[in-house]
Every structure is written in structure tokens, then in C-alpha cells.
Image (cartoon, rainbow, N blue to C red):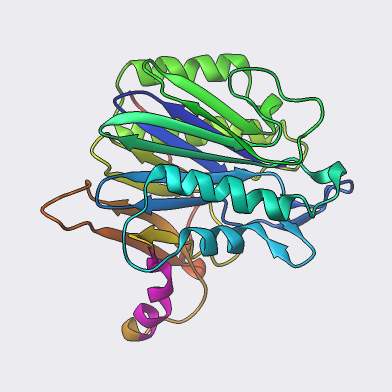
Amino acid sequence: MTLNITIAARWLMAQSSDFCITTPGSGATVNETSQKQVVLQYMRWSGLVCYTGVAKYNSHNTAEWLTDALTHDPGQRSPQQVVDQLVKDGTKWLRRVPATYRHHTFTMITYEKKMPNVYVISNFERPNGPQLPTPEDALFCTHLRPHGPRCVVTGYTPAVLDPQRMALRDLLASNPTPLVLRETVAMASREASARAKGSVSESCVVSHLCPDGSGEAQVFGNLAGEFLPTMITSGQNVATLMPMVKNHAGVSGPQRLVGATWTANGNEGVSVMTGAYRLLSEQAGDGWPSTPPVR
């Protein structure tokens, strides 16, 4: 199990995801640089998709599957098309997982016509009620349209305490800058990792979305391995360009994402996504801000 924190309102949204994969039962760490959040950018909308639950089973790898599911020929998809595909195709492979381990949730956030939308696609988690005691064998979607600040935690939910959730809602109500919101959500995830019995990494990625579709992703904490995450623009995974860019720049050695920025939707027919990367050998300090967020 992992941890995703989503905080949403009409004026700003943010979503966090940690990097840790563990083995059920033993709790042994398998990977500490696993991608669990994907940025989606289209001409009319932008979104973030994250997951918690089954990361690998036999030949199935959820990060790779999610990349394949979200990548397509250049063109447009609607948020509902993405949700429908996650529900339909996600259910197919989830049914092959033994029932004991069949707990899985995708969370997607979008602004559509500048209105916030939160889609929780799960077989056991319900943001409007308690978790199902027995997971269903099919994914179902709960669609939220928050007006005031809303905090949705999926995965290892007990690790995020009620005072933390209230503090995040109160912060969002104060209309913070995106940077302050990202840093505060990251700190909440970091604090929660200490309560998660080794199943949630201290490092995480936090991304924000603005009503115009622009946003930014930021990695908090140093990483032990290369991290070149999938980022989708109009169906194309721009991360596939990284090997060519590295060769052109004459850079060698494992790298990891520092952060990514994308522009507003429908900006004169042009959408742009840029990323900043760093060699693992050049990581300094602990990778966290040296001072606490200032509102």
C-alpha cells in the first residue's frame, strides 16, 4: 500500500504520491523510485492521475500499464474517456490478482471549464463513505465536484491524521501560492510516512493544477535510482525524448526529475511542457526545502 493525498477547490488543486513499493506480508521494500503519478495535458484540459494498491503481479506492472493506457496517437481525449478506460481495462487485470491483494485505487483530478473534478476509481475506497469491508471484483468511479476545499486521502489512509487533513483544507481556503501548497502537502506526506510502517517513502512528488490547466510537478527528497517519469501531452509520452536529449547534451549517468511545468490549455493553439532533471551524482543535501513553507 502507498499514499496519495489530493487537495482540491475551485481555485487550486494539488496531488501527492510517494515512490515506495513493498512486498505484501513481509513488507520488504522492492523499489523506492516507482512512478505512481502521471501528468496529462491536452488542448482543453489538464489532469493528474495517481494510483495506490497493486504495483506488480506476475508479468503485470501498473506503472508500465498506466503509461500504455494513457499514451495514444496524437490527438484529444476527454476526461470521461480516460476514466472509462481506467475502469474497463483496469478491472480486467485486477481480476487476475488474488482476492487477498485485490485492493486498488486510481485518483484523477482535472479542471474542466475551470471547474474542479475529482475521480476516485477504486474497488474498495469511497471518498464519501467508509471503505468497503470486502473489495469488489470490478473498479467503480466516484465523481466529486468540490466547491470548497476538499481533502481526499487514498492508500494508507490512517497515516494522515484528521488534524493534518483539516490543516490542509484550511490552508487551501486561505488561497495560498501553488509553491506553498505543494510544499505543505509534501510535508504532510513526509510526516505520514513515519506512521505507515515502511510502506510509504519519505520522498514524494507533488503536483498542482490551476483552473486554466497550467501546473507544475516537484520532487521532494533525494532518490536512490533514476526517475524519468511518463508525462503525457496530447497522447504522447514526452519522457521518451530524454535519451535523445541526454545524448545531445553529452550527459551520461542516471538522472531524476527535479520538476516539470506545463502551460495553460488552449494558449493560441500551443501547449508546452518542460522538465528539469539532475544527475543522481549531483544531488545535494536531503532534497527538501531548507525552510518550512511560508503562507
In which quadrant is the N terminus drawn? top right
**Quick check: 111 left or right of 139?**
left
Question: Could you say where residue 76 lies in the image, as x and y percent from the top left?
Answer: 32, 56
Task: Name the quadrant containing residue 239.
Answer: bottom left
Taking the magenta stretch, the answer to whether it contains residue 243 is yes
Q: Nearer the viewer, residue 20 or 232?
A: 232
Q: Hey, which residue is sitting farthest left in the picture?
A: 268
Image: 208 above or below 62: above
Q: Tell whether position 223 is magenta.
A: no
Q: Residue 233 at x, y = what percent?
A: 34, 60
Camera sees residue 18? no
Question: Which one is in front, 52 or 124?
Answer: 124
Q: Main secondary structure of the magenta part?
A: helix
Q: How many marks?
A: 0
Vertically, is 192 above or below 264?
A: above
Q: Position of residue 159 (x, y in %)?
A: 68, 28
Residue in view at x 39 percent, y 79 percent: 246
Q: Indicate whether 162 appears above or below 211.
A: above
42 displayed left or right of 181: left
- 123 and 289: which is toward the camera: 123
Res 235 quadrant in image: bottom left
Q: Residue at x 64, y 51 (%)?
A: 90
- Region rendered in magenta: 236-247
Q: Residue at x 69, y 53 (%)?
A: 92
Q: Is residue 99 above or below residue 147?
A: below
Q: Is residue 229 visible?
A: yes
Residue 256 percent coordinates (x, y):
48, 64
- Quarter in which the C terminus is drawn: top left
Q: Residue at x 54, y 54 (%)?
A: 222
